[in-house]
Amino acid sequence: MNVLVINCGSSSLKYQLIDSESEAVLAKGLCERIGIDGRLVYQKTGLDKEITEAPMPTHKQAIELVINALVNDKTGAIKDLSEIDAVGHRLVHGGEKFACSVVISDEVLQAVEECNDLAPLHNPANLIGVAACQEVMPNVPMVGVFDTAFHQTMPKKAYLYGLPYEYYEKYKVRRYGFHGTSHSFVSKRLAEYLGLDYQNSKLIVAHLGNGASISAVQNGKCIDTSMGLTPLEGLVMGTRSGDIDPAIMEFIAKKENLDIEGVMNVLNKKSGVQGLSRLSSDFRDLEDGHANGNEMATNAIEVFCYRVAKYIGAYVAAMNGVDAIAFTAGIGENGPLVRQKVMEYLGYLGIAVNEETNGVHGDEAVISTADSKVKVCVIPTNEELAIARETVALVK
Ligand code: ADP
């Protein structure tokens, strides 16, 4: 089966065409600046990237351009539209309604729309992507895979905030968690890679990218994760603050003369390692800065790693132990310095860094020493493949 995986934002749309038998990526790319002017990036596996400036007033035109590229005589990956057997959509917020992936129907779309309030920037854009695909491919089955679904197994004690209970009852204010597709994929692969029984294991996954989150997965179920009602909670991220004293919001609002939108903008876009370092949100720049004696870059890296280590400690407590820990996503897969610094906090778990294997970039590896009591690994994430697998499982 060929599955087209779609990750649709308000002005961009990422896609991958995956052959589900071989799990090979046949082609991939993205549409950018939808509704502004429009740029299509397309790459058939094995060939060079093609970049085409092309008008994309709406997402429908963007999808049409993607399909045209996929079936193009010269560089297309398939002959015609009939070779796309299913579409898998990344959907950000499924609220409490979706604990697993679903075949998209009118009822499902309605239920997703009811969650829009919880993810006003992402869900409406995701739904526009679904509608555009349905218009262009009316007879192709579509599946929705939610970022929040994997975390729906969290117990009440983990997902409730210490707020008036009526906010949960009236508005569903609670912790949901994100990056669920990645946490699910990586935790399963971690167990498999180490020969552990997934259904009888205590695992921690640190998804460290621009957005970053950690989850505790006990016996194959997520029991806690660091992101909350929104992706702002938890770790210090590229530009997001993560956990702060909520009273800081009023304090800064008064000092800087900001309204609530202004404060939220600071917490989402001007904080994290970017705000701390005054240099960059990108860890490659921070590592260069650190290597060249930039103290602000070093501080930002230290704050980031300390927060990760504290969350790992919290999740060891939550599960009363841990069998293995995985690092994944951009920084987790490519950042030996961050991994080493985090692991240095974990000596109490009988963890020691294998300095040779910790040099790995983007490959699976055990990066703790052979005699470490708890194994620490790098496990590359692959959210598109996870979405393709879920899609096949539901439409077959
Ligand atoms: P997102 O999907 O949230 O945008 P990614 O998972 O792509 O994020 O991760 C982006 C982060 O990964 C950036 O901070 C980037 O600097 C970091 N990263 C990517 N490659 C490397 C590398 N070789 N060394 C260190 N950090 C890296």
Image: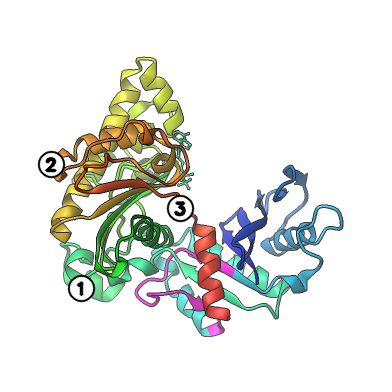
**Front residue (pair 54, 328):** 328
At horizontal 35% and vertical 24% (from top left) the residue drawn is 297
Identify the disc placed on residue 381.
Answer: 3
In the image, is the residue at mark 3 within 8 Å of ligand 1 by its beta carbon?
A: yes
**Front residue (pair 16, 104):** 16
Would residue 245 be seen by someone viewing this image from the given angle? no
Residue found at the far front of this picture: 370
| In this rendering, the label closer to the viewer, 2 or 3 | 2
Image spot of residue 275 (x, y percent)? 36, 32
Q: Main secondary structure of the magenta part?
A: loop
Amino acid found under the numbered disc labelled 1:
Glu
* Circles 3, 1 touching at the beta carbon (< 8 Å): no
93 in the magenta segment = yes
**Front residue (pair 114, 178):** 178
Lower sequence index among marks 2 and 3:
2
Identify the disc placed on residue 166.
Answer: 1
Amino acid found under the numbered disc labelled 2:
Tyr
Would residue 203 be seen by someone viewing this image from the given angle? yes
Q: Which residues are magenta?
A: 88-106
Q: Which residue is mark 2?
A: 348
Q: From the viewer's perspective, is 14 left or right of 135? A: left
Q: From the viewer's perspective, is 4 left or right of 188? A: right
Residue found at the far right of this picture: 73
Q: Quadrant of residue 354?
A: top left
